[in-house]
Image (tube, rainbow, N blue to C red):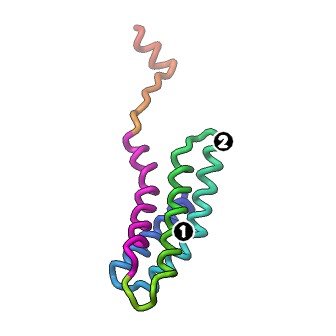
Amino acid sequence: MRSRLLAPGIALAALLADAAGLHGLAGWLVLVALPAACAVAFVGVSDALEGLGSLRGVTASLALVLLAIGSAVREHAPRGGSVPAVAVSAIVAALICYAIPVFAWVLQPVRVTRTPKAVANAQR
């Protein structure tokens, strides 16, 4: 579980570094987030192949693509200029992708299962 939180944590740190004006640090953080995002996507896809649900695999893979696009756009931006809006938007979209499975888990309806003892008590 901790490895699944590493990539969004680094991406959030990159977003905060961009907000603080530390664009060089943010660029490095996005670059460091890519291997962690690969690991999260790999775990999500393997969970989907095992039949444990495909939502996390799809969103983690999409977040990996968005972080790669944001890193590429950031790297090809002129030095000393402002950070392209696409780079920052890609980080925000990747964080949203990482949050979608959490919202799906929170909004999932509760399943009530009755144990044999509860069924026997209900029939009395």
Most distant residue in the bottom direction: 80
Residue beneath disc 2:
50
Residue beneath disc 1:
68
Q: Which mark is residue 1?
A: none
Secondary-structure class at tag 1: helix
Disc 2 versus disc 1: nearer the observer = 1
Q: Position of residue 8 (x, y in %)?
A: 47, 64
| Span of residues in magenta | 83-107
Q: Quadrant of the N terminus?
A: bottom right
- For the point 37% across and 41% down, the residue is 107
- For the point 50% across and 77% down, the residue is 29
- For the point 54% across and 71% down, the residue is 33
The correct choice, above or below, for 81 with respect to 12 in the image is below
Quarter holding residue 32? bottom right
Secondary-structure class at tag 2: loop
Q: Locate residue 9 relative to residue 82 in the image: left or right.
A: right
The correct choice, above or below, for 13 with respect to 38 in the image is below
Q: Quadrant of the C terminus?
A: top left
Tell me which secondary structure the magenta stretch mostly adopts: helix
Q: Position of residue 63 (x, y in %)?
A: 50, 60
Quarter holding residue 110? top left
Which kind of residue does numbered mark 1 sit on? Ala
Residue 14 covered by magenta stretch: no
The correct choice, above or below, for 73 with respect to 40 in the image is below
Nearest the camera: 94 or 9? 94
Which kind of residue does numbered mark 2 sit on? Glu
Q: Position of residue 55 (x, y in %)?
A: 51, 45
Nearest the camera: 66 or 6? 66
